[in-house]
């Protein structure tokens, strides 16, 4: 699994050299490179799956906190506002992730 993730990370590093967000041609699929720990708000109408390729992410729904890292994914099936941020950010552990918004 690590070999596959490392190949994906190499491709993401190339794709996300100059951009931190790429909306792909696949409807609802977005690639992210997160270089700071600022919070990002996900709207109440966004039900999504998020996969971490490198780094860690903390995800909040109300006062509940969930943390996941490389190779893990989270399905957010709640129709509620959520908040997330990267954790333990460093240059070598820049957060690379993909989200798939479900309609």
Image: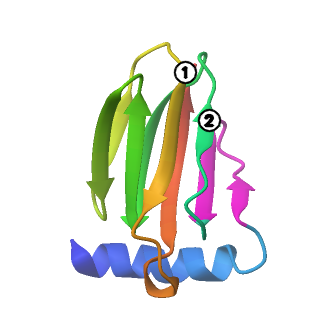
Q: Is residue 80 above or below residue 43?
A: above
Q: What segment carries the magenta color?
A: 20-33
Give the CA distance from mark 1 to mark 2. 7 Å
Circle 1 SS class? loop
Q: Which quadrant of the figure has residue 13?
A: bottom right
Number of callouts: 2
Residue at (52, 35) in percent of width and height: 83
- Residue 65 sits above or below residue 10 on the image: above
Residue occupying the point 28% across, 61% down:
71
Work out whether residue 36 or residue 32 is closer to the camera in this orientation and state it: 36
Q: In the shown orientation, is residue 85 left or right of residue 15?
A: left
Q: Residue 89: give x, y in percent of width and height.
A: 46, 72
User: Most extreme residue toward the top, as rendered?
Assistant: 79
Whether tag 1 and tag 2 are in contact, CB under 8 A, the answer is yes
Which residue appears at 49% of the width and 13% of the height? 79
Percent position of residue 40, x then y: 61, 43
Picture quadrant where residue 62 is located: top left
In the image, residue 17 lies at what x, y percent?
71, 80
Q: Is 24 in the magenta?
A: yes
Marked residue nearer the N-terminal end (1 or 2): 2
Instruction: Give the color scheme: rainbow, by chain, secondary structure or one colour.
Output: rainbow
Q: Residue furthest front?
A: 63
Query: Label 1 belongs to which residue?
Result: 81
Q: Is residue 1 left or right of residue 94?
A: left
What residue sits right under mark 2 in the picture? Answer: 41
Residue 6 part of the magenta segment: no
Q: Disc number at residue 61?
A: none
- Quadrant (top left/top right/bottom left/bottom right) for the C terminus: top right
Circle 2 Cα neighbour tier, 10 Å, few/some/many (<14 / 14–19 / ≥20): few
The N terminus sits in image quarter: bottom left
Left or right, 103 with respect to 9, comes to right
């Amino acid at each position: 699994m690590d070999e596959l993730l490392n190949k994906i990370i190499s491709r993401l590093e190339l794709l996300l050299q100059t951009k931190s967000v790429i909306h792909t041609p696949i409807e609802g699929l977005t690639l992210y490179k997160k270089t700071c720990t600022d919070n990002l708000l996900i709207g109440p109408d966004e039900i999504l799956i998020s996969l971490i390729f490198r780094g860690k992410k903390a995800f909040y729904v109300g006062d509940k906190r969930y943390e996941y890292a490389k190779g893990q994914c989270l399905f957010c099936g709640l129709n509620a506002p959520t908040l997330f941020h990267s954790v333990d950010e460093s240059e070598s552990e820049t957060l690379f992730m993909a989200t798939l918004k479900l309609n």
